[in-house]
Image (cartoon, rainbow, N blue to C red):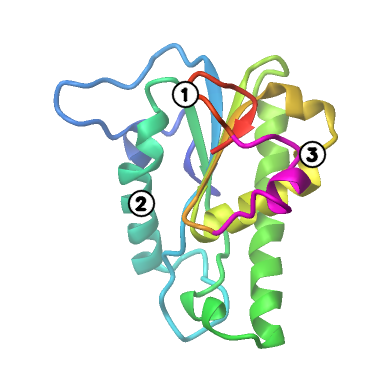
C-alpha cells in the first residue's frame, strides 16, 4: 500500500479523493482507474526520482488532486508511486535518459500488474496518464492491452500531454481514437 499515492483504502491521505466544495466522490465505484502522474521530480541530482523525495511526492500529490480527482466520481483511482525520470531526461538524447525512462516504466508495469490482480476481473477500467505518465501509458497500451483480452475491459484511455500520432501510435495501442463523446473502448 505504501507504493501507491492513491488506491482504495487509503482514506483521507488519498489525494485523488479531493473534491471541490459541494461535490462528493463516489462510494460505489463502477470502474477502476489506473492513473500515471506527470513528472514531479525536477532535481538534477539523479536520473530517477528517489521514492522518498518529499518535494517530488508533494508535487505528485498536487497533480493527483488536480487531475486524477476528475475520475473519483465514477470509480476508484489507483495511482502508483514510481521512480520517474527526472525532467532533464526529456531534454537530451543521452543513453542514460532512455535508461531512466525504462526504469520508471518498469515500476509502472509492476504497479499495473498489481492493479489487475486486485481489481475484480469483470470491472471496467479507465486508463489515464499525463505528460511522462502519458508516455508510459502509450507503452503500457502497446505492451499489455493491444491484442489482449484486457482490451475489452478498457472504457477509455486518456493519453494527455504527450504527442500521439493518429497514423502510427494509435494503431499500435490497439484501440481506435475516440470520435464521439459517448464512444467507449477508445483513446482520447
Q: Which residue is mark 1?
A: 181
Asked whether, in this view, residue 183 is left or right of residue 87, the answer is right
Q: CA distance from mark 2 to mark 1?
A: 25 Å
Image quarter of residue 28: top left
Provide the secondary structure element on which disc 3 rests: loop
Q: Nearer the viewer, residue 155 or 105?
A: 155
Q: Is residue 103 visible?
A: yes
Q: Secondary structure at mark 2?
A: helix
Q: Which residues are magenta?
A: 163-177
Within 10 Å of disc 2 (Cα), the crowding (few <14, some 14-19, many 20+) is some
The disc label shown at residue 63, or none: 2
Q: Earlier in the sequence, mark 2 or mark 1?
A: 2
Residue at the (28%, 35%) spot, across then down: 18
Q: Are marks 2 and 1 in contact (CB under 8 Å)?
A: no
Q: CA distance from mark 3 to mark 1?
A: 22 Å
Q: Position of 47 compared to 72: left or right?
A: right
* Residue 146, label in figure: 3
Crowding near the residue tagged with mark 3, few <14, some 14–19, many ≥20 C-alpha atoms within 10 Å? some
Q: Position of residue 133 (x, y in %)?
A: 54, 54
x, y percentage for residue 24?
26, 20
Question: In what element is the residue under mark 1?
Answer: loop
> Which residue sits at x=34%, y=68%?
55
Using residue 4 as the reference point, say whether residue 25 is left or right of it. Answer: left
Q: Residue at x 31, y 43 (%)?
A: 65
Question: Counting other residues with Cα less than 10 Å from the Cα at mark 1, is it few (<14), some (14-19), or many (20 or more)?
Answer: few
Amino acid at each position: 500500500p505504501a507504493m501507491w499515492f492513491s488506491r482504495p483504502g487509503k482514506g483521507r491521505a488519498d489525494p485523488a479523493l479531493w473534491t471541490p466544495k459541494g461535490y462528493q466522490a463516489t462510494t460505489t465505484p463502477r470502474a477502476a482507474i489506473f492513473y500515471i502522474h506527470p513528472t514531479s521530480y525536477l532535481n538534477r541530482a539523479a536520473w530517477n526520482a528517489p521514492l522518498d523525495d518529499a518535494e517530488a511526492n508533494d508535487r505528485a500529490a498536487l497533480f493527483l488532486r488536480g487531475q486524477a480527482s476528475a475520475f473519483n466520481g465514477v470509480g476508484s483511482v489507483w495511482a502508483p508511486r514510481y521512480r520517474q525520470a527526472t525532467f532533464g531526461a526529456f531534454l537530451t538524447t543521452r543513453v542514460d535518459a532512455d535508461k531512466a525512462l525504462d526504469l520508471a516504466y518498469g515500476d509502472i508495469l509492476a504497479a499495473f500488474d498489481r492493479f489487475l490482480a486486485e481489481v475484480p476481473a469483470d470491472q471496467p477500467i479507465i486508463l489515464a496518464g499525463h505528460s511522462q505518465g502519458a508516455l508510459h501509458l502509450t507503452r503500457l497500451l502497446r505492451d499489455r492491452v493491444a491484442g489482449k483480452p484486457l482490451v475489452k475491459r478498457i472504457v477509455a484511455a486518456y493519453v494527455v500531454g504527450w504527442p500521439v500520432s493518429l497514423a502510427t501510435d494509435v494503431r499500435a495501442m490497439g484501440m481506435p481514437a475516440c470520435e464521439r463523446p459517448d464512444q467507449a473502448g477508445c483513446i482520447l
